[in-house]
Image (spheres, grey):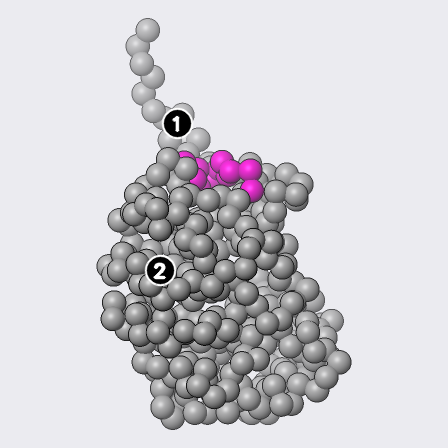
Amino acid sequence: MASYRRIHIEISNICNLQCSFCPEVERDKKTMSPEDFAAIAEQLPGTVDEICLHLMGEPLLHPQLATILEICETFALPVNLTSNAILLHGARRALLLKPIIRQVNFSIHAFEANFGSEGVGPYFEKILRFIMEAEQLRPDLYINLRLWDLADPAAESAANRELRERLEAAFEKPIRSEDIDLRRKKNLQLRGRIYVHFDSRFVWPSLEQPLRSQTGFCHGLGNHFGIHADGTVVPCCLDKEAALALGNVFEEKLESILKGPRAEAMRSGFARGELVEDLCQRCDFVRRFDRKARRLAQGYRDTVSKAPRPEL
Protein backbone atom coordinates (compact mmCIF):
# COMPACT_ATOMS: atom_id res chain seq x y z
CA MET A 1 0.00 0.00 0.00
CA ALA A 2 1.23 3.50 -0.82
CA SER A 3 2.59 5.73 1.91
CA TYR A 4 0.46 8.65 3.08
CA ARG A 5 1.36 11.68 5.13
CA ARG A 6 -1.72 11.32 7.31
CA ILE A 7 -4.98 9.50 7.82
CA HIS A 8 -8.02 11.20 9.34
CA ILE A 9 -9.82 8.76 11.61
CA GLU A 10 -13.12 10.05 12.92
CA ILE A 11 -13.31 8.44 16.36
CA SER A 12 -16.61 10.27 16.90
CA ASN A 13 -18.78 12.47 14.70
CA ILE A 14 -20.38 14.07 17.76
CA CYS A 15 -19.41 17.62 18.73
CA ASN A 16 -20.13 19.72 21.80
CA LEU A 17 -20.39 22.93 19.75
CA GLN A 18 -22.14 24.06 16.58
CA CYS A 19 -20.03 26.50 14.61
CA SER A 20 -21.49 28.51 11.74
CA PHE A 21 -18.55 27.59 9.51
CA CYS A 22 -18.75 23.86 10.31
CA PRO A 23 -22.00 22.26 9.07
CA GLU A 24 -23.82 19.77 11.24
CA VAL A 25 -23.25 16.10 10.47
CA GLU A 26 -26.28 14.55 8.76
CA ARG A 27 -25.11 10.97 9.31
CA ASP A 28 -26.24 8.93 12.30
CA LYS A 29 -24.34 9.87 15.44
CA LYS A 30 -21.55 7.38 15.99
CA THR A 31 -18.59 6.81 18.31
CA MET A 32 -15.95 4.33 17.20
CA SER A 33 -15.16 1.57 19.69
CA PRO A 34 -11.54 0.90 20.71
CA GLU A 35 -11.86 -2.57 19.18
CA ASP A 36 -12.83 -1.12 15.81
CA PHE A 37 -10.10 1.48 16.08
CA ALA A 38 -7.53 -1.25 16.77
CA ALA A 39 -8.72 -3.18 13.71
CA ILE A 40 -7.87 -0.12 11.62
CA ALA A 41 -4.64 0.74 13.45
CA GLU A 42 -3.09 -2.67 12.87
CA GLN A 43 -3.26 -2.04 9.11
CA LEU A 44 -1.44 1.29 9.28
CA PRO A 45 2.21 0.84 10.38
CA GLY A 46 4.50 1.69 7.48
CA THR A 47 1.59 3.23 5.59
CA VAL A 48 0.93 6.60 7.27
CA ASP A 49 3.20 9.11 9.00
CA GLU A 50 0.54 10.13 11.52
CA ILE A 51 -3.08 9.69 12.56
CA CYS A 52 -5.38 12.69 12.82
CA LEU A 53 -8.08 11.79 15.34
CA HIS A 54 -10.57 14.03 13.64
CA LEU A 55 -12.68 14.34 10.56
CA MET A 56 -15.90 15.60 12.09
CA GLY A 57 -16.71 15.71 15.81
CA GLU A 58 -14.74 16.60 18.94
CA PRO A 59 -12.19 13.89 19.86
CA LEU A 60 -12.02 14.92 23.53
CA LEU A 61 -15.65 13.80 23.83
CA HIS A 62 -14.68 10.17 23.22
CA PRO A 63 -15.26 8.33 26.53
CA GLN A 64 -12.35 5.94 25.85
CA LEU A 65 -9.83 8.34 24.38
CA ALA A 66 -7.13 7.03 26.75
CA THR A 67 -7.56 3.55 25.28
CA ILE A 68 -7.50 4.95 21.73
CA LEU A 69 -4.15 6.62 22.48
CA GLU A 70 -2.80 3.42 24.03
CA ILE A 71 -3.61 1.62 20.78
CA CYS A 72 -1.71 4.29 18.87
CA GLU A 73 1.24 3.69 21.20
CA THR A 74 1.06 -0.06 20.60
CA PHE A 75 1.36 0.41 16.84
CA ALA A 76 3.79 3.37 17.08
CA LEU A 77 1.40 5.70 15.24
CA PRO A 78 2.05 9.40 16.06
CA VAL A 79 -1.14 11.37 16.74
CA ASN A 80 -2.26 14.74 15.44
CA LEU A 81 -5.31 15.88 17.41
CA THR A 82 -7.66 18.80 16.71
CA SER A 83 -9.92 20.16 19.45
CA ASN A 84 -12.01 23.23 20.20
CA ALA A 85 -10.40 23.24 23.69
CA ILE A 86 -13.70 23.52 25.56
CA LEU A 87 -12.94 20.25 27.40
CA LEU A 88 -9.29 21.09 28.04
CA HIS A 89 -9.20 20.21 31.74
CA GLY A 90 -8.71 17.31 34.12
CA ALA A 91 -7.88 13.89 32.73
CA ARG A 92 -8.50 14.97 29.13
CA ARG A 93 -5.91 17.73 29.46
CA ALA A 94 -3.36 15.24 30.79
CA LEU A 95 -3.99 12.91 27.84
CA LEU A 96 -2.85 15.59 25.40
CA LEU A 97 0.60 15.51 26.99
CA LYS A 98 1.16 11.81 26.25
CA PRO A 99 4.35 11.18 24.23
CA ILE A 100 2.46 9.53 21.35
CA ILE A 101 0.83 12.88 20.50
CA ARG A 102 2.95 14.76 17.98
CA GLN A 103 0.77 17.84 17.47
CA VAL A 104 -2.28 19.45 19.06
CA ASN A 105 -4.39 21.94 17.12
CA PHE A 106 -6.79 24.21 18.98
CA SER A 107 -9.52 25.70 16.79
CA ILE A 108 -9.75 28.91 18.78
CA HIS A 109 -12.04 30.47 16.14
CA ALA A 110 -14.73 28.18 17.63
CA PHE A 111 -15.07 30.54 20.61
CA GLU A 112 -16.33 33.48 18.58
CA ALA A 113 -18.70 31.22 16.64
CA ASN A 114 -20.38 29.96 19.84
CA PHE A 115 -19.65 32.44 22.65
CA GLY A 116 -18.92 35.66 20.80
CA SER A 117 -20.74 37.84 23.32
CA GLU A 118 -18.80 36.43 26.28
CA GLY A 119 -15.32 37.38 27.41
CA VAL A 120 -12.54 35.23 26.00
CA GLY A 121 -10.39 35.52 29.15
CA PRO A 122 -11.17 32.19 30.90
CA TYR A 123 -11.07 30.29 27.60
CA PHE A 124 -7.73 31.80 26.61
CA GLU A 125 -6.17 31.30 30.04
CA LYS A 126 -7.10 27.62 29.97
CA ILE A 127 -5.25 27.17 26.68
CA LEU A 128 -2.31 29.27 27.86
CA ARG A 129 -1.92 27.15 31.01
CA PHE A 130 -1.82 24.03 28.87
CA ILE A 131 0.82 25.58 26.59
CA MET A 132 3.02 26.53 29.53
CA GLU A 133 2.71 23.04 31.01
CA ALA A 134 3.49 21.47 27.62
CA GLU A 135 6.58 23.61 27.23
CA GLN A 136 7.85 22.17 30.50
CA LEU A 137 6.79 18.54 30.10
CA ARG A 138 6.62 18.12 26.30
CA PRO A 139 8.92 20.67 24.61
CA ASP A 140 8.80 18.47 21.50
CA LEU A 141 5.01 18.88 21.17
CA TYR A 142 3.77 21.09 18.35
CA ILE A 143 0.82 23.30 19.34
CA ASN A 144 -1.08 25.07 16.60
CA LEU A 145 -3.63 27.79 17.46
CA ARG A 146 -6.03 28.08 14.56
CA LEU A 147 -7.92 31.20 13.48
CA TRP A 148 -9.56 29.87 10.38
CA ASP A 149 -12.52 32.18 9.86
CA LEU A 150 -10.77 35.24 8.48
CA ALA A 151 -12.55 36.47 5.38
CA ASP A 152 -10.82 39.83 5.72
CA PRO A 153 -8.15 40.32 8.43
CA ALA A 154 -9.06 44.00 8.58
CA ALA A 155 -12.64 43.09 9.52
CA GLU A 156 -12.02 40.40 12.12
CA SER A 157 -14.51 39.90 14.95
CA ALA A 158 -14.05 41.50 18.35
CA ALA A 159 -13.52 38.09 19.98
CA ASN A 160 -10.84 37.09 17.50
CA ARG A 161 -9.17 40.47 17.85
CA GLU A 162 -9.05 40.01 21.62
CA LEU A 163 -7.60 36.52 21.23
CA ARG A 164 -4.93 37.90 18.95
CA GLU A 165 -4.12 40.71 21.38
CA ARG A 166 -3.87 38.25 24.27
CA LEU A 167 -1.51 36.08 22.22
CA GLU A 168 0.63 39.14 21.53
CA ALA A 169 0.83 39.96 25.23
CA ALA A 170 1.45 36.38 26.38
CA PHE A 171 4.20 35.66 23.87
CA GLU A 172 5.50 39.21 23.45
CA LYS A 173 5.07 38.80 19.71
CA PRO A 174 3.32 41.38 17.51
CA ILE A 175 0.62 39.92 15.27
CA ARG A 176 -0.34 42.79 13.00
CA SER A 177 -3.34 42.52 10.69
CA GLU A 178 -1.29 43.86 7.78
CA ASP A 179 1.21 41.03 8.25
CA ILE A 180 -1.43 38.32 7.77
CA ASP A 181 -1.24 37.13 4.16
CA LEU A 182 -3.59 34.22 3.59
CA ARG A 183 -2.18 33.65 0.10
CA ARG A 184 1.47 33.17 1.04
CA LYS A 185 2.31 32.63 4.71
CA LYS A 186 -0.35 31.48 7.16
CA ASN A 187 1.82 30.22 10.03
CA LEU A 188 3.37 32.56 12.56
CA GLN A 189 5.75 31.14 15.15
CA LEU A 190 5.02 32.48 18.63
CA ARG A 191 7.74 30.61 20.50
CA GLY A 192 9.50 27.26 20.15
CA ARG A 193 6.95 24.87 18.66
CA ILE A 194 3.96 27.11 19.39
CA TYR A 195 2.33 28.60 16.30
CA VAL A 196 -0.75 30.58 15.36
CA HIS A 197 -2.23 29.61 12.01
CA PHE A 198 -4.48 31.93 10.00
CA ASP A 199 -6.83 30.94 7.23
CA SER A 200 -10.10 31.99 5.62
CA ARG A 201 -13.47 30.33 5.79
CA PHE A 202 -14.39 27.94 3.01
CA VAL A 203 -17.60 26.41 1.74
CA TRP A 204 -17.85 22.72 2.56
CA PRO A 205 -18.30 20.65 -0.61
CA SER A 206 -21.79 19.38 -1.26
CA LEU A 207 -23.65 17.82 -4.14
CA GLU A 208 -26.12 20.67 -3.73
CA GLN A 209 -23.48 23.23 -4.68
CA PRO A 210 -23.42 24.45 -8.29
CA LEU A 211 -20.96 22.92 -10.73
CA ARG A 212 -17.68 24.83 -10.50
CA SER A 213 -15.22 23.10 -12.82
CA GLN A 214 -14.19 19.75 -14.21
CA THR A 215 -10.56 20.85 -14.07
CA GLY A 216 -8.81 20.74 -10.72
CA PHE A 217 -6.44 19.08 -8.32
CA CYS A 218 -6.72 17.77 -4.76
CA HIS A 219 -4.34 16.17 -2.27
CA GLY A 220 -7.00 13.62 -1.40
CA LEU A 221 -5.66 10.08 -1.96
CA GLY A 222 -2.28 11.67 -2.57
CA ASN A 223 -1.06 12.55 0.90
CA HIS A 224 -4.17 11.78 2.96
CA PHE A 225 -7.52 10.03 3.18
CA GLY A 226 -10.16 9.57 5.86
CA ILE A 227 -12.23 6.98 7.67
CA HIS A 228 -15.60 7.82 9.18
CA ALA A 229 -16.71 6.54 12.57
CA ASP A 230 -18.70 3.74 10.91
CA GLY A 231 -15.66 2.55 8.93
CA THR A 232 -16.48 4.23 5.61
CA VAL A 233 -13.30 5.16 3.76
CA VAL A 234 -13.34 8.54 1.99
CA PRO A 235 -10.67 10.20 -0.16
CA CYS A 236 -10.84 13.61 1.44
CA CYS A 237 -11.09 15.11 4.93
CA LEU A 238 -13.90 17.39 3.65
CA ASP A 239 -16.15 14.53 2.53
CA LYS A 240 -18.19 14.74 5.69
CA GLU A 241 -21.21 12.78 4.43
CA ALA A 242 -19.28 10.06 2.52
CA ALA A 243 -20.53 11.15 -0.89
CA LEU A 244 -17.33 9.57 -2.27
CA ALA A 245 -17.45 6.35 -0.24
CA LEU A 246 -14.69 4.01 -1.40
CA GLY A 247 -15.60 1.06 0.80
CA ASN A 248 -15.83 0.08 4.45
CA VAL A 249 -12.71 -0.89 6.37
CA PHE A 250 -14.69 -3.24 8.61
CA GLU A 251 -15.80 -5.22 5.57
CA GLU A 252 -12.71 -5.08 3.35
CA LYS A 253 -8.98 -4.59 3.82
CA LEU A 254 -7.89 -0.98 3.64
CA GLU A 255 -5.23 -1.71 1.02
CA SER A 256 -7.84 -3.20 -1.29
CA ILE A 257 -10.15 -0.22 -0.83
CA LEU A 258 -7.43 2.32 -1.63
CA LYS A 259 -6.55 0.38 -4.79
CA GLY A 260 -10.17 0.05 -5.89
CA PRO A 261 -11.43 1.38 -9.24
CA ARG A 262 -13.10 4.49 -7.83
CA ALA A 263 -10.00 5.50 -5.87
CA GLU A 264 -7.71 4.84 -8.84
CA ALA A 265 -9.95 6.86 -11.17
CA MET A 266 -9.87 9.83 -8.81
CA ARG A 267 -6.11 9.59 -8.30
CA SER A 268 -5.45 9.38 -12.04
CA GLY A 269 -7.78 12.30 -12.65
CA PHE A 270 -5.96 14.53 -10.17
CA ALA A 271 -2.65 13.60 -11.80
CA ARG A 272 -3.84 15.07 -15.11
CA GLY A 273 -5.66 18.04 -13.55
CA GLU A 274 -9.13 16.57 -13.95
CA LEU A 275 -11.95 16.19 -11.43
CA VAL A 276 -13.77 12.98 -12.25
CA GLU A 277 -16.24 12.98 -9.33
CA ASP A 278 -19.39 15.07 -9.15
CA LEU A 279 -18.64 16.26 -5.61
CA CYS A 280 -15.11 17.34 -6.56
CA GLN A 281 -16.51 19.36 -9.47
CA ARG A 282 -18.62 21.24 -6.94
CA CYS A 283 -15.89 21.73 -4.34
CA ASP A 284 -14.81 25.30 -3.75
CA PHE A 285 -11.79 24.34 -1.63
CA VAL A 286 -9.93 22.91 -4.65
CA ARG A 287 -9.86 26.44 -6.05
CA ARG A 288 -6.74 26.84 -3.90
CA PHE A 289 -4.93 24.40 -6.18
CA ASP A 290 -6.13 25.80 -9.52
CA ARG A 291 -2.65 26.91 -10.58
CA LYS A 292 -1.26 23.41 -10.09
CA ALA A 293 -4.30 21.91 -11.84
CA ARG A 294 -3.66 24.05 -14.90
CA ARG A 295 -0.02 22.94 -15.00
CA LEU A 296 -1.00 19.29 -14.70
CA ALA A 297 -3.68 19.61 -17.39
CA GLN A 298 -1.26 21.32 -19.77
CA GLY A 299 1.42 18.70 -19.08
CA TYR A 300 -1.04 15.92 -19.81
CA ARG A 301 -2.14 17.56 -23.06
CA ASP A 302 1.49 17.99 -24.11
CA THR A 303 2.23 14.33 -23.36
CA VAL A 304 -0.76 13.14 -25.36
CA SER A 305 0.10 15.37 -28.31
CA LYS A 306 3.65 14.00 -28.43
CA ALA A 307 2.65 10.37 -28.19
CA PRO A 308 3.37 8.36 -31.37
CA ARG A 309 0.31 7.75 -33.51
CA PRO A 310 -0.43 4.20 -34.66
CA GLU A 311 0.11 3.52 -38.37
CA LEU A 312 -3.04 3.05 -40.40
The foreground one among 131 and 95 is 95
Q: Position of residue 72 (x, y in %)?
A: 31, 70
Point 52% across, 70% down: residue: 58
Whichever of labels 2 and 1 marks the residue nearer the N terminus, that label is: 2
The amino acid sitting under disc 1 is Val
Q: Residue furthest top?
A: 312
In the image: residue 27, left or right of residue 230: right
**Residue shown at 63% from the left, 59% from the top:** 23
Q: Magenta: predominant secondary structure element?
A: helix
Per the image, label 2 sits on a secondary structure element best described as helix
> Is 249 positioned to the left or the right of 85 in the image?
left
**Magenta stretch?**
265-279
Question: Residue at 60% of width from left, 81% of height from top?
Answer: 175
The residue at 39%/64% (across/down) is 33
- Residue 10 occupies quadrant: bottom left
Give the vertical position of 1 relative to 51 (above or below). above
Residue 283 appears left or right of 79: right
> Is-magenta flag for residue 269?
yes
Quickly name the residue at label 2: 36
Question: Is any part of residue 186 visible from this angle?
Answer: no
Expressed as whole percent of the image width and height from the top left, the position of residue 283 reads 58, 47
User: Which label is found at residue 208?
Assistant: none
Q: Which mark is residue 304?
A: 1
Quadrant showing the C terminus: top left
Residue type of the residue flagged with mark 2? Asp
In front: mark 2 or mark 1? 2
Task: State how far apart marks 2 and 1 are (Cα).
Answer: 45 Å
89 or 138: which is nearer to us?
A: 89
Q: Is residue 19 above or below residue 262?
A: below
Crowding at mark 2 (Cα within 10 Å: few <14, some 14-19, many 20+): some
